[in-house]
Structures are given as C-alpha cells and as structure tokens.
C-alpha cells in the first residue's frame, strides 16, 4: 500500500479485527478489496456512492448497465433548427465514460472528432451529417453545443456503435456491449494524385447545369481568395456570366453521378439580414475565418450527395429542392435534384433576384483535394471535366 493514510487505517483495523467475532468479518474483506483496487467504478459499488465528478443521473452495476440523464432537443432550448423536438440527446462526456473513444472538440469552430481505434468520426454542431473514415452519412438530428456541454443524438450512438439505450422520461438505461460495435470501412488513401490522375477520377462527372461550362472567372474557382470564410473559396461558382448560358431560379440542377442523398434541406428558412450580419461578425472576431458551423448556414439551402468513388458533392445556395427527393435516396446520374438560387447570400436574405448561382463543393474521402494543386492546375482539371 503506497498511501500512508491507508496503511495506518489498515493497521488499526487489524487490531480491531482480532477482537471481532469471525461471523462479522465480511466488512473486513470488503475493506481489503477497496484499498487494493484502482478501479473507480468498483470503489463506487463498494461504497454505494457515485463518482463525485459525474454530472448526470448515473449508476454503476456489475451487469454493465449504466443509468444516466438525457435531454430532449426541445428541453435544450436550441433555436434555429428544424428537428423532431422529441429527439433525445446524451452528453459526449457520458459516451466517453462508457465507450473506449478519444475525442477532440473545437467549440469555436463547432467541430467534434471521435476516434475509436483507427476509425475517425467527424461531426459539426447543427449539421445533420457526419463523416466516417472519409465517407459521409446522414444523422436523424444534428449534434448540439449547449449548456456548456456537447450533446449527441442518442440515435447516433445506437446506429453507429451498435448500442441499445432504453429511455424513460429524462433517464436512460444503457447496457454497454462492446461486442456489438460493428466493423467500419477503413479510410482509403487521400494522397496527392497527379493532374492526369485527378482528371481521370473526376471524368465520371457530368456538368451540374445543362450546357454550362466551368466559369472563366478565377474568383469563381476553388482556392480564390476571400475576405471571410476560411480565407479561400472552397467550391466552384456557376453564374450566368462566365458559364456561357443564362442561369436563374428556373435553372435545374442535376446530379453529376449516381450517389446517395445524405442531406436535403427542404425545411430551410432564410435568415434575416440582421442574423446574417451577426454571423459575419463572428468571422471578423475569428481572424477572418468563418467557423465551420456558421459557414454551413451561409451556404443556404443545400443538397449533399455521396458518390461511390469517395467523392462527395455539396450543392449550395439552392432556391428549392425536388419535392420527392429525400435523405437516403439513390439518385441517378443526370437526375434533377432542384433549382439554382441565392439562399444564404446577402441577396437571398434581402429577397432579391440578384446573385443567383450554384455553389458546388467537391471532396475526396473527406479531403478538400484542391489544396494539392496550384491555381493553374485546378483550372486545367476543371476545364477537362466541365
């Protein structure tokens, strides 16, 4: 025993136990088990007490069932989201107690990274999509940062990690079973490809707007300088000028390849001008770099599609989405997904018809691959594809 106080207490108890009848020695064996274990949960069981650091209703038991508090989306008082108000949430800190994960939270950018062995899961507050080893998938509800905590939808824990939680009111019972955690698809290589290799990879894509070609304006292309966002323009802008055709709110947008819809913002509501200006001020206070969760709001109404070859496309600033297009749908190459708009932009919040365009982002296994190329190389790739 390394702790002097425990050594002294044990010596004293040794004297007492000598004069105690044998039938009353059970407590003595419990004491020995307590001082020789480093497992906090075992000590909690022996003492019948909870871990002093816990903040929820939680208990430890030998059958590995945990009891703790949960909250509904509505009770978290999180405005601005169109989510089932009865959706239940669990603290990330509670998940960390029960699953062998490591986490990295950036509250300023609103990002959450969860690592389980070699598997990496990335989420962003208020966005109903997550990334699993470079591939994107939908969430039934977005993660939330509120009340000084990170909250994850219970459905994410159940569906992603194969767990079962029983919820009654604001209390959840979770029989933690590590054996039910599924095998995950490994992350594929995101090493830099040559210009010709990238042209070959992207050659499966068709133009998202009929008869349009990629813009001749450098400011419309990936990597163009911006005074906000992350300092660079991530995507490709398709305006009337520079693309060879007229583009307006009646211009259809088509899926560039067959893929799975992972986000479709049917319920999007335009911001007010005051709200948008407040969000942009946050960028100014963050050295001109727009936090990820705010940047998502500035994209307006969006459709995200995950393609089979690791490519994920974000179609942003849309005016409207095809009424029967739903998350989980498999769309065909050339299938209409909606119409060009200006949602999320300064013109959109003013209900103006100006500034209508499609903003298109492309990622390869979660990576913004344009960073691997010079500006001229990016133009060469895009002109070869579109």
Image (spheres, rainbow, N blue to C red):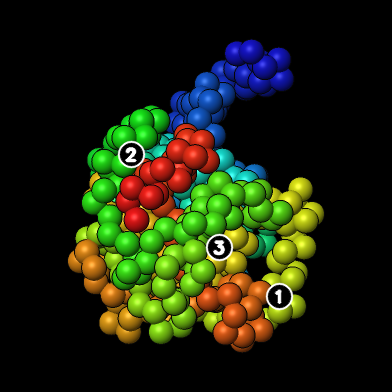
The one nearer the camera, 342 or 328, is 342
Describe residue 200's horizontal placement relative to residue 231 as left or right.
left
Give the crowd class for mark 3: few <14, some 14-19, many >=20 residues within 10 Å: some
Describe residue 280's horizontal placement relative to residue 169 as left or right.
right
* Residue 146 point in image, percent of width and height: 64, 62
* Residue 296: assigned label: 3
Is residue 369 visible in this depiction of the protein?
yes
Q: Quadrant of the C terminus?
A: bottom left
Seen at 44% across and 65% down, the residue is 243
Is residue 77 visible in this depiction of the protein?
no
**Dividing the picture into quarters, in which one does residue 342 lie?**
bottom right
The image shows residue 347, relative to residue 227, as above or below, that is: below
Pointer 3 or 1: first along the chain: 1
Give the crowd class for mark 1: few <14, some 14-19, many >=20 residues within 10 Å: few
- Looking at the rendered image, the disc whose residue lies closer to the viewer, 2 or 3, is 2
Circles 2 and 3 in contact, beta carbons < 8 Å: no
* Residue 77 point in image, percent of width and height: 63, 74
For mark 2, give the secondary structure. Answer: helix
* Residue 275: assigned label: 1
* Residue 169 point in image, percent of width and height: 47, 73
The one nearer the camera, 122 or 171, is 122
The image shows residue 29, relative to residue 182, as above or below, that is: above
Q: In 3D space, how far apart are the residues under numbered discs 2 and 1 (Cα atoms)? A: 39 Å
* Residue 198: assigned label: 2
């Amino acid at each position: 025993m390394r702790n002097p106080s425990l050594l002294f207490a044990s010596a004293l108890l040794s004297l007492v136990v000598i004069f105690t009848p044998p039938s009353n020695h059970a407590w003595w064996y419990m004491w020995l088990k307590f001082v020789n274990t480093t497992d906090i949960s075992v000590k909690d069981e022996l003492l019948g007490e909870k871990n002093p650091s816990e903040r929820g209703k939680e208990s430890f038991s030998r059958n590995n069932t945990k009891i703790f508090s949960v909250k509904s989306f509505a009770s978290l008082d999180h405005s601005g989201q169109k989510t089932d108000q009865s959706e239940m949430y669990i603290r990330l800190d509670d998940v960390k107690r029960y699953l062998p994960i490591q986490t990295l939270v950036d509250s300023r950018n609103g990002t959450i990274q969860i690592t389980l062995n070699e598997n990496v899961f990335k989420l962003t507050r208020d966005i109903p999509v997550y990334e699993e080893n470079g591939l994107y998938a939908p969430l039934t509800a977005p993660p939330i940062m509120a009340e000084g905590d990170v909250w994850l939808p219970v459905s994410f824990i159940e569906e992603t990690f194969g767990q079962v939680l029983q919820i009654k009111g604001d209390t959840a019972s979770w029989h933690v079973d590590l054996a039910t955690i599924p095998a995950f698809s490994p992350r594929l290589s995101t090493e830099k490809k040559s210009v010709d290799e990238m042209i070959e990879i992207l050659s499966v894509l068709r133009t998202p707007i009929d008869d349009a070609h990629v813009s001749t304006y450098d400011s419309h292309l990936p990597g163009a300088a911006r005074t906000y966002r992350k300092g660079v323009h991530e995507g490709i802008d398709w305006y009337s000028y520079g693309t060879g055709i007229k583009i307006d709110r009646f211009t259809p947008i088509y899926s560039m390849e067959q893929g799975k819809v992972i986000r479709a913002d049917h319920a999007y509501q335009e911001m007010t001008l005051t709200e948008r200006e407040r969000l942009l001020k946050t960028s100014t206070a963050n050295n001109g770099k727009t936090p990820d969760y705010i940047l998502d709001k500035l994209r307006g109404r969006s459709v995200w599609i995950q393609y089979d070859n690791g490519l994920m496309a974000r179609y942003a600033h849309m005016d409207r989405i095809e009424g029967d297009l739903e998350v989980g749908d498999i769309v065909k190459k050339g299938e209409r997904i909606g119409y060009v708009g200006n949602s999320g932009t300064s013109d959109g919040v003013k209900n103006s018809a100006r500034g209508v365009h499609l903003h298109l982002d492309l990622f390869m296994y979660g990576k913004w691959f344009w960073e691997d190329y010079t500006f001229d190389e990016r133009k060469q790739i895009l002109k070869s594809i579109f």
